[in-house]
Image (spheres, coloured by chain):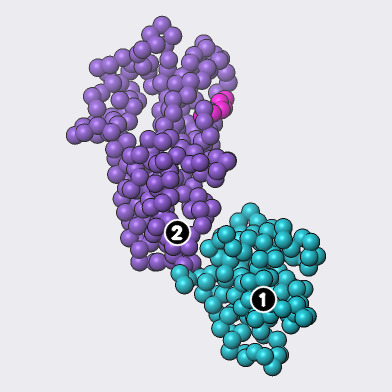
Chain colours: A purple, B cyan
């Protein structure tokens, strides 16, 4: 049985989409969540990987999330100092031309642990009951936006009892605005009245070079 | 719940056709079951979402299996299949029926699948 929050979402959708089956709603919910996560970056995970020293340049390292999810973007990489586990190390230049495969700008000369932060999106398989898997707090925080996306996608389907092009445009516009707002909130780490800019990294541990100045990894 | 299995469809369709007395039946089981087999792909053409992960079956008239053979369609759309079958029965050249009635049932079946009707 689905959780209470997903049941509420489905009941809201069922009431507005006469004749729609749950199976189709679940398929569209997957599409909506994929678009939401790719557009907003709100689902992040820190993944520690051990980089052996003296690896050849352009060595590729697999970055694997802990749960059923797909790596969408590389956000940032920091070193982890085993002597100072509470402090963030310096930022590392890295790339991810293939999602989930990390390449470093410079290989370390000795073994090092890097903390890779990635943005995730949804992935198959869904749960046994057909629902896509993602963190519960996302639905709690963005329930209106997700409902708009679900309604907009469903109403745009041609020749269905619930087809409604006017309302589809309305809901999709609200969904797009909601995704954009979520992205802005994420860049500000969900803090109220915080400016996007953060103090340069030279005043904290690590080099100022390459430190983000727009608030992400603060 | 109504219309889960093939035999329930057959009896409901006979009710609409006023063909419930086996003396013998005016419309054979084979004919009705064939119409039901045709109804599913026709419904899939209009509503592919109703048959996600479903292989469309072809029903046979072995009486013993009609009571247990499930018709794989959502309960909201079972009436559309029944209407389609009634329309198919009445499409034949028969002094008992009129073409208008057949056309009306076929239209109702389509409307049931594509509209909130």
Magenta stretch encompasses residue A36: no
User: Is residue B27 left or right of A15 when viewed as pictured?
Assistant: right
User: Is residue A213 left or right of A112 when viewed as pictured?
Assistant: left
- The residue labelled by disc 1 is B14
Does residue B108 lie above or below A215 as drawn?
A: below
Q: Is residue A198 visible?
A: yes
**Is the C terminus of chain A in the top left, top right, bottom left or bottom right quadrant?**
top left
Q: CA distance from mark 1 to mark 2?
A: 36 Å
Q: Are marks 1 and 2 on the same chain?
A: no
Q: Position of residue B58 (x, y in %)?
A: 74, 65
Magenta stretch encompasses residue A63: yes
Front one among B104 and A138: B104
Front one among A189 and B22: B22
Does residue A216 lie above or below A89 as drawn?
A: below
* Chain identity of mark 2: A
Front one among B6 and A60: B6
Q: Residue furthest bottom?
A: B95
| Contact, mark 1 vs mark 2 (Cβ under 8 Å) | no
Q: Quadrant of residue B101?
A: bottom right
Give the magenta part as a residue range: A59-65
Q: Position of residue A118 (x, y in %)?
A: 44, 31
- The residue labelled by disc 2 is A154
Residue at the image position 34 percent from the left and 48 percent from the top:
A145
Residue at the image position 70 percent from the left and 66 percent from the top:
B7
Q: Residue furthest left?
A: A193
Q: Residues within 10 Å of mark 2 (few under 14, many from 20)?
A: many
- Closer to the camera: disc 1 or disc 2? 1
Front one among A89 and A127: A127
């Amino acid at each position: 049985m689905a959780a209470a929050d997903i049941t509420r979402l489905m009941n809201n959708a069922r009431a507005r989409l006469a004749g729609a089956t749950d199976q189709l709603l679940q398929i569209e919910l997957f599409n909506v969540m994929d678009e939401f996560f790719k557009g907003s970056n709100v689902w992040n995970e820190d993944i520690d990987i051990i980089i052996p020293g003296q690896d050849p340049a352009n060595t590729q390292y697999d970055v694997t999330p802990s749960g059923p999810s797909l790596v969408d973007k590389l956000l940032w990489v920091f070193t982890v100092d085993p002597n100072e586990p509470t402090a963030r190390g310096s930022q590392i230049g890295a790339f991810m031309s293939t999602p989930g495969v990390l390449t470093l700008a410079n290989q370390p000369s000795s073994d090092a642990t890097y903390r890779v932060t990635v943005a995730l999106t949804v992935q198959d398989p869904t749960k046994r009951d057909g629902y896509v898997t993602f963190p519960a707090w996302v639905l709690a925080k963005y329930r209106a936006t997700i409902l708009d996306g679900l309604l907009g996608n469903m109403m745009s389907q041609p020749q269905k009892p619930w087809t409604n092009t006017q309302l589809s445009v309305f809901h999709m516009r609200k969904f797009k605005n909601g995704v954009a707002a979520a992205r802005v909130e994420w860049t500000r780490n969900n803090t109220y009245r915080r400016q996007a800019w953060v103090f340069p990294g030279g005043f904290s541990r690590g080099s100022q070079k390459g430190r983000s100045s727009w608030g992400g990894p603060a | 719940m109504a219309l889960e299995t093939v035999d329930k469809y057959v009896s409901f369709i006979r009710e609409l056709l006023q063909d419930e007395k086996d003396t013998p039946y005016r419309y054979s089981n084979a004919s009705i079951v064939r119409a039901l087999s045709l109804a599913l792909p026709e419904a899939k053409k209009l509503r592919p979402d109703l048959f996600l992960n479903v292989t469309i079956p072809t029903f046979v008239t072995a009486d013993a299996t009609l009571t247990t053979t499930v018709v794989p369609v959502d309960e909201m759309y079972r009436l559309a299949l029944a209407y389609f079958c009634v329309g198919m029965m009445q499409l034949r050249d028969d002094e008992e029926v009129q073409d208008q009635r057949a056309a009306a049932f076929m239209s109702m079946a389509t409307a049931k699948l594509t509209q909130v009707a």
